[in-house]
Amino acid sequence: MTSSSPNISVNLLCKLRDGDTLAFEEIYRALAPKLYQRLLRLFKDTATVEEIVQDTFLKLWEKRQQIDPEQGFKTYLYRIADHLAIDLFRKISRDKALQEELWASAVSFYLQTEETTIGKEQYQLVVQAIQQLSPKRRQVVLMCKLEGRSYQEVADAMGISVSTVSNQLVKAIKEIKRYVLRSAHGEQIVLLYLLGWMIIFQ
Amino acid sequence: MENQAYIKQLLADYLNKQISREEFNQLFSQLGDLEDEAFKATVLQVLESQPAFVDARFIDERVAALYPQLQAKIERPVKWQRRWHLVRPYISVAAVVLVILFTGWFLLSERQYPKKKDIVTTEQVLPGTNRAKLTLADGLTVDLSEYQNGVIMGDEIKYSDGSRVLGSTGKGASLMTISTPKGGTYQITLSDGTQVWLNAGSSLSYPAHFPEGERMVEVSGEAYFEVAKDEKRPFKVSSSGQQIEVLGTAFNIAAYPDEADTKTTLVQGKVKVFNLIAHHSNLLRPGQQATVHGAHIEVGQANVEASIAWKDGLFNFHELTIDQAMKQIERWYDVNVRYEGKKPSGYLGGKMSRGVKLSTFLNFLEQDFQIKAEWKSDRTLILKPAS
């Protein structure tokens, strides 16, 4: 387990067990970022990661009464998340169409890619995809991803808020991903790929 | 052992940076070969290793933006609890009002609403499940268990786990019907060992025991057959406008009353499709699809995977028009679809699990196709271009 995560006090866990939503929020804010990062390394796609993060914390909420505040809580939370993540990653490892989608996620996630790594064709595709973006999104992508500037810098330079920067970036990456995916399958067929799976809470 | 180290290195590279397409393919072909336990252990182990990128600001933004959605999902019951003390003085008044309202509702409801339906949102529209009804020759009907996925015909009718549905199956040739509602699916094993998967809104009529000479069944809607081999008794399937004759084979048939075409897709073996109106027959080879439309019959190459995806729990929208895809959505989610303005043109593609909530599909329709869906309380979806 990553030791750098903040510690969750026994007191906070007791409150969570009793259904205190503020305690839940505090735990979410303390642990979700690390979890998000872990999942993003695996899936390279914010929508997928956010679905798993949400499902993990929902499950935690559903099962809050079973929490033993004295036991390793982070391990418990990560076990829930890992279970969901491994299931999905397993599914991808057995499905060519999902791998195609994951590849598009990876390519659009690492935009500061060298031509030598992904090959000329894919590189061209990414360049084209960036050119297709609206001017505002293109600028966000260029500044954040290619020039490596901080969100605050970009926000100041463009006169928008930091959350607008991150939102625009997510939307831009999504557009690029769609562009890459569509080209992988040619022509005008619009793709609707969906990593759909359902978790039932008991 | 060496191989293990190789996979781990590839995986670590994948987690930390952009890898080449060759490495990516290598990684997934290797991962795909692992057993479940080894797969899990490998991925988790590498995931624990040095985290590479940290784009903390971005992640903090996303995590914060995500919370309101999560909060909305957990908070509803708690809010209610917290405000309880404010409500208490009014309880007796409320109780009286409730009794009056309830009596009124009770008196009116039977006439006005044939079925009590709560107002649902698309978030709550769940996908279909294992649901079907079995109708015996004497008209007796049995609702089949939602916790089972199939029934087996024999001297008794059993569920696929061996538990009993009904004692006796009745006399040999008496016809039974198994039918699924919209949003239902079920499997059935016939007395000769033939397996049939029924899609939503479909039905299959068959005798409890097949007589000598031929095995005859009738299907409406969509079904996938894996016919048990029996050369002495050809298997015949009749459906709107056509009859097909098979020996031992696997095929899919889609014959919905609300669709003009009857489509037969052959997976393996050999079938003969007979157009009952034109009195004309065609022989299908594996991978071919016959489309019967009135007196017309057309045979062409099929996308087999797409045609039978439903039986494996997937929607495969490959080359379907939006209209065709929405027909599948209507049947699986038990909803009605209408279009405002002109029907959107173009084709869909890709796959989607049949396990997702309706709202997930609608989000994609809006984001990827700029089609907005308006949800009405009578389970109608009105599709229109997003402005």
Image (cartoon, rainbow, N blue to C red):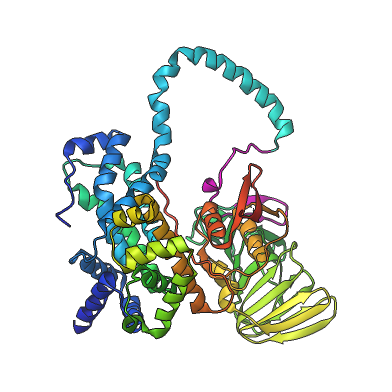
Residue B50: give x, y in percent of width and height: 17, 66
Q: Is residue B194 above or below residue B79?
A: below
Number of numbered discs present?
Answer: 0
Residue span colored magenta: B115-143
Q: Residue at x 28, y 58 (%)?
A: A150
User: Along the horizontal axis of the image, is A88 left or right of B134?
Assistant: left
Can residue A65 be seen here?
no
Q: Residue B250 sits in which quadrant?
A: bottom right
Asked which quadrant contains residue B328, the reply is bottom right
Q: Nearer the viewer, residue B131 or A46?
A: A46
Left or right: residue B156 versus residue A68 is: right
Q: Position of residue B278 (x, y in %)?
A: 85, 79
Between B106 and A141, which is closer to the camera in this rendering? A141
Residue B2 seen in this snapshot: yes
Estimate the x, y position of residue A97 in percent, counting from the top left: 46, 74
B291 inside magenta stretch: no
Q: Please state which of residues B262 and B317 is positioned toward the viewer in this rendering.
A: B317
Image-quadrant location for residue A79: bottom left
* Residue at screen point 23% across, 83% down: B3
Outermost residue toward the left in this view:
A3
User: In the shown orientation, is residue B225 left or right of residue B241?
Assistant: left
Vertical arrangement, residue A12 with respect to residue A105, above or below: above
Question: As drawn, is B173 to the left or to the right of B168?
Answer: right
Q: Nearer the viewer, residue A48 or A108?
A: A108
Residue A67 pos. (x, y %)? 25, 42
Q: How would you classify the magenta stretch by its main secondary structure?
A: loop
Is residue B131 within the magenta segment? Answer: yes
User: Where is the N terminus of chain B found, in terms of image quarters?
Assistant: bottom left
**Is B45 placed above or below B245 here?**
above
Q: Which residue is painted at 46% across and 75% down in the image?
A: A128
Q: Residue at left 17%, top 40%?
A: A9
